[in-house]
Amino acid sequence: MNMTITEKILAAHAGRSSVSPGENVWCNVDVLMTHDVCGPGTIGIFKDEFGPDAKVFDPERVVIIPDHYIFTGDPKAHRNIDILRQFVGEQGLRHFYDPDFIPRELPGGEVPEPYCDPCQTSYRGVCHAALAQNGHVRPGEVLLGTDSHTCTAGAFGEFATGVGNTDAAFVLGTGQTWLKVPVSLKFVFHGELPPYLMGKDLILHAIGEIGVDGATYCAMEFEGETIRSLNVDERMTICNMAIEAGGKNGIIAADEVTLEYVRARSEGDFECYHSDAGAKYAKVYEFDTGKLEATLACPHSPDKRATARDLSDVRIDRSYIGSCTGGKTTDFIAAATVLAGQRVKVETFIVPATTEVDTDLDRCTVGGETLREIFLAAGCKVGPASCAACLGGPVDTFGRANEPLTVVSTTNRNFPGRMGHKEAQVYLASPLTAAASALTGHITDPREMLA
């Protein structure tokens, strides 16, 4: 039976030779991830259902990554960190990336001092990027996380999807989950990626093509010469936003780019799967990458597609470059190529996704200057690694829109209130477009700056 890559992975984890879209199957789970927002709720359900002294299915395969509400004075956010710490101690979990700079008894209202050195803390930053950087993603595996953007890890040829607290609690106790095999959609990008486009432009174009419900409970499989030319950071950006089209998962088959990255960071054996030539797809979408332009999503939905050229009359108050979608090293190198030697005209926030990316701000250079030097000289505000304003967060969150501002952002959602104020107008864009717009004070096609 010919199968897609998603169907092959689920069949293998269900102990079956084949599965078909629409079937419900029990699957073994390789990795379960949770964070500071959903972790306490998941733990509570786990203890209620399995007992206060129950043990997790495998302490080596549970990963806890606090990342959402870290640099805030909110006492409930601090309480959540303590709940995670207690559970980790009880269970003997190995993979806990503790924000160890937050004291266990931090007074309410006091924002913790951030890490002094990103290389000297166990904290890692945003879970979706940290999972990859710390060796928790492998081709052919099943990874579940209590966050809808867990689909990011599909960039490594694995089945990765978000689950709710109740499902996660069941996995904690059993190592299994009940899944319906999704129908697959294929998105093929042909040709060479122009220097003014990034992975963010590709996925925003695809979402604009099918709508936010166009891939509801479908596997979004990406391939083509353009996709194969992308590095790991860019592939993660594309799979990260599969959920914005309603997708169950996004996935890119592993190749040498994938394997080089994974083998350098991960231990253990894994199996790579690829779709059969005769595999069935509900629909195949094909794009000529060379004909695409810098693409944005207008407020308040990721499918409100428009080109930067057509939005040039939109004035902005702020540019925000960060998050799991737009705060990786490749994203900042792109932004720095635009900002080098220039000064921004609007408030511009730089937020690295992880502590590893934070170190890259001082390690990577453009034109002889480090990324951090370029951003600071341009007048940007550089914050510590975290989700920061991507999810809004408490009012003291770095970069949060506390007023009805117009923001160009490299984040993944622009629903009302997503970045703070419910009347803020958020335009989703690539780091190139966000940087170009920061220099002009209006939405700007990066071709104007790269020329």
Image (spheres, grey):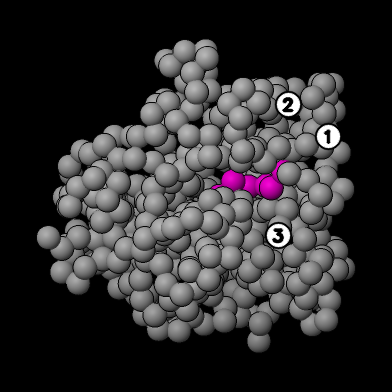
The outermost residue toward the front is: 268
> Which residue position holds label 3?
357
Is disc 2 surrounded by few (<14), some (14 to 19) or many (20+) residues within 10 Å? many
Q: Indicate the quadrant containing the C terminus: top left, top right, bottom left or bottom right.
A: bottom right
Are the residues flagged by discs 2 and 3 in contact, CB closer than 8 Å? no
Q: Residue at x 53, y 39 (%)?
A: 60
Q: Residue at x 63, y 69 (%)?
A: 330
Query: Which labelled disc corresponds to residue 78?
Result: 2
- The answer to if 127 sits in the magenta stretch is yes
Check disc 3 and report its element: helix, strand or loop: helix
Are the residues flagged by discs 3 and 1 in contact, CB closer than 8 Å? no
The amino acid at mark 3 is Val
Q: Of label 3 and label 1, which has the lower sequence position?
A: 1
The outermost residue toward the left is: 1
Question: Percent position (x, y) of residue 91?
Answer: 58, 26
Q: Residue at x 24, y 61 (%)?
A: 4
The amino acid at mark 1 is Pro
Q: Which residues are magenta?
A: 123-128
- The answer to if 373 sits in the magenta stretch is no
Are the residues flagged by discs 2 and 1 in contact, CB closer than 8 Å? yes
Instruction: Give the alpha-carbon distance from disc 2 to disc 3, as whole Å.
Output: 24 Å
Q: Residue at x 68, y 35 (%)?
A: 69
The amino acid at mark 2 is His
Check disc 2 and report its element: helix, strand or loop: helix
Q: Quadrant of residue 417?
A: top right
Q: Is residue 356 above or below residue 96?
A: below
Is disc 1 surrounded by few (<14), some (14 to 19) or many (20+) residues within 10 Å? some
Is disc 3 surrounded by few (<14), some (14 to 19) or many (20+) residues within 10 Å? many
> Which residue position holds label 1?
112
